[in-house]
Image (tube, rainbow, N blue to C red):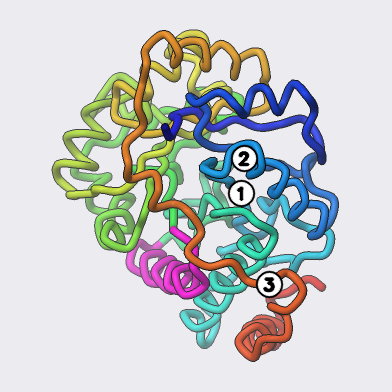
Amino acid sequence: MQGSLMLDVAGAWLTAEDRQLLRQPEVGGLILFARNIEEPRQVQALCRAIRQIRPDLLLAVDQEGGRVQRLRQGFVRLPAMGRFAGLENALPLAEACGWLMASEVLAVGLDFSFAPVLDLDYQRSVVIGARAFAGNPALATALAGAFIHGMHAAGMAATGKHFPGHGWAEADSHVAIPVDERDLPALQARDMQPFVRLASQLQAVMPAHVIYPAVDARPAGFSRRWLQDILRGQLGFSGVIFSDDLSMAGAHVAGDAAERIEAALQAGCDMGLVCNDRAAAELALGRLQQLGVRAPARLSGMRARSRPDLYGYRQQPRWQQALGLLRGAGLLDS
């Protein structure tokens, strides 16, 4: 049975407590953070240890580029996505970056990165900023589409975030509850455009911990209006819906961790993330055990579609070409 809870572990190697937790069938995924990562061979060994316990678990990471990349030592330091806009050959560069990112993530044994960011950069949000490709919807869509094409070519599923758009709300949902006062037509005209145009290319979507009171009083990730009526109904999206981290302050409006994961799944999320708080993860797990939730089969579409050899992928001509393109454009820090 594929579980509906994605959680994390404390260190670079599994503890006995971690192993027992991962054996619970309600656990369906694990996300790695910087504290879990030393260098490529260690990450590969950690992923193998996890799969020995649960071969079916989805293994994820946030490897966007810029300030949000967990894989660093022994990996390419990727540029922030906002650096592509305005460059000559921006689309081939974005595609090369998507392919390179996905190849490195897949090579160490992970299934996918939660990428790309489809938010728009209004130069308002303290948490989005240069994580976004652009402030212009058409340009952001084109660049993200190229990045996704590169991810797919490497064998990785794409996750668009943070639906319907986190770029306007100024507060950081990690520590506050952001509010975006604009109405639905305004959101449809701009922020939702990348999601609308790329819906058929996305295997997953992650909603924002943002309240859009003109549409619904609940944050998007807890809203059937946003997830069922709009994302599923109007946009026709049939892929996976992941909650954003339910430990973030923006999710606390829904109650404790047990109430949050139940609310997220009832709203339409297929898998809930509870990170950086083991007690909260165990509380959420207990609620799922009570509910007897079965995760949908579509989660299997997030598995890696290819697995580059960790010791040989950098010799591939496409690797050298992608690295050369990004380096030639001045996009690589090292």
In three-dimensional space, the C-alpha distance between marks 2 and 1, rounded to whole angstroms, equals: 8 Å
**In the picture, residue 142 is in which quadrant?**
bottom left
- Residue on which the image places disc 1: 62
Whole-percent x and y of residue 204? 38, 49
Q: Earlier in the sequence, mark 1 or mark 3?
A: 1
Lower sequence index among marks 2 and 1: 2
Q: Is residue 143 magenta?
A: yes
Which residue corresponds to mark 3? 309
Residue 332 lies, in percent from the top left, at 73, 74
**Circles 2 and 1: CB distance less than 8 Å?**
yes
> Which one is earlier in the sequence, the residue at label 3 or at label 2?
2
The residue range painted magenta reads 136-157
Label 1: few (<14), some (14–19) or many (≥20) C-alpha neighbours in 10 Å? some
Image quadrant in which the N terminus is located: top left
CA gap, disc 1 to disc 3? 21 Å
- Is 232 left, or right, of 306 in this rendering? left
Please name which of the two marks, 2 or 1, marks the residue nearer to the observer: 2
| Callout 2 secondary element | strand
